[in-house]
Structures are given as C-alpha cells and as structure tokens.
Amino acid sequence: MSEILNVCARQLMDTAPQIMQVVRVEMRRGRGTDLSIPQFRTLRFVQRNPDSSLSSLADHLGLMLPSVSKLVDGLVRNELVIRRESIADRRRITLALTLAGEAIVDAARVSAQTFLANSLSSLCGEDLEIVHRAMDLLHPIFVLHARGLSAKD
C-alpha cells in the first residue's frame, strides 16, 4: 500500500469517530426528553432499515429478543412504531415508523445537521468544496462496505 493510502486511512480512523461522536450527541440532543436512548436508537434503526425485524433490531442494539420486544411494545403504545406482517412471509413481523416516529427522527437529524453546518462555517468556500468532494468520493465506498460488498463486486 502506498504511503498516501496509509496516511488517508490513518486520518479517517482518527477523524471519523470524532465526527460520529458529535453526530450522536447532537442527534440525541434533538430526540426530546420523552425518549430513552435505546428507544431513539430503535427509531433511527427502523427508519434506516424499512421492514426490519425484531431480530435485526436486537442484533443492532446488542440486546436479547425479549428485551427488544418489550422496547418495541412501548414504542407501539406511544404510536411511534407499527408492527405488521411481512408481505413475503406472513410468519415474519416487520417494523415501520409512524408519521410521529418519522417526525422525531427527522427533527433530530435536522438539529444535528444544523449543528454540523455551524461547525463547518469557519471554513472558507474552497475548503468546503474540498470537504464536499471528499464526502462524494467516500460515500459510495462505505455504503458498499456497510452492505457487505466491495467496489469490485
């Protein structure tokens, strides 16, 4: 691997966790006080993974299925999540957000995005273009990795 690849990889490893920490803090700040962090993480996961199952949610949260079921029960009672039969397999239950659940996650996302924009406002236009271009280049690479694929697939 060339030296520049190593430097870029090290910079990503040093910077990405810091960025994600800020995003997590700001998303949680925008979630409102009525939701626990696990409840908010559940809403966010269901929004990003339409028709997700209790099992996939349990894997994501690192919780046992009965705990996740109880967590989702509370969100269903609060009319933030709905359970429904899978179209493909009637034995499988999938999760979806209600309009109220979507609104909570979207408001938190807008709040975090506003915070990030304010944080970046000290950069000049040319530097902002560089950040924008870097994100355009990195996004497809890491979306593929998140799906378990590589650019060569």
Image (tube, rainbow, N blue to C red):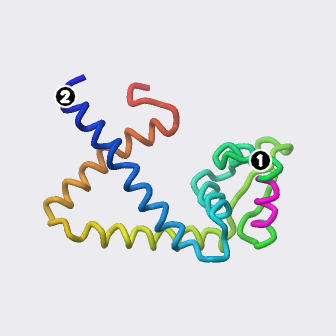
Pointer 1 local density, CA inside 10 Å: few below 14, some 14–19, many at least 20: few
Nearer-N-terminus badge (2/1): 2
Asked whether, in this view, residue 60 is left or right of residue 138, the answer is right
Q: Residue at image x 78%, y 48%?
A: 86
Q: Which residue is mark 1?
A: 87
Nearest to the observer: residue 55 or residue 100: 55
Label count reads 2
Asked whether, in this view, residue 142 is left or right of residue 45, the answer is left
Circle 1: residue type: Ile
Is 71 a magenta residue? yes
SS class, disc 1: loop
Q: The C terminus is located in which quarter?
A: top left
Q: Residue at image x 79%, y 66%?
A: 74
Nearest to the observer: residue 121 or residue 18: 18
Q: For the magenta stretch, what is the residue range?
A: 68-75
Q: Residue at image x 82%, y 58%?
A: 70
Residue 47, by quadrant, is bottom right
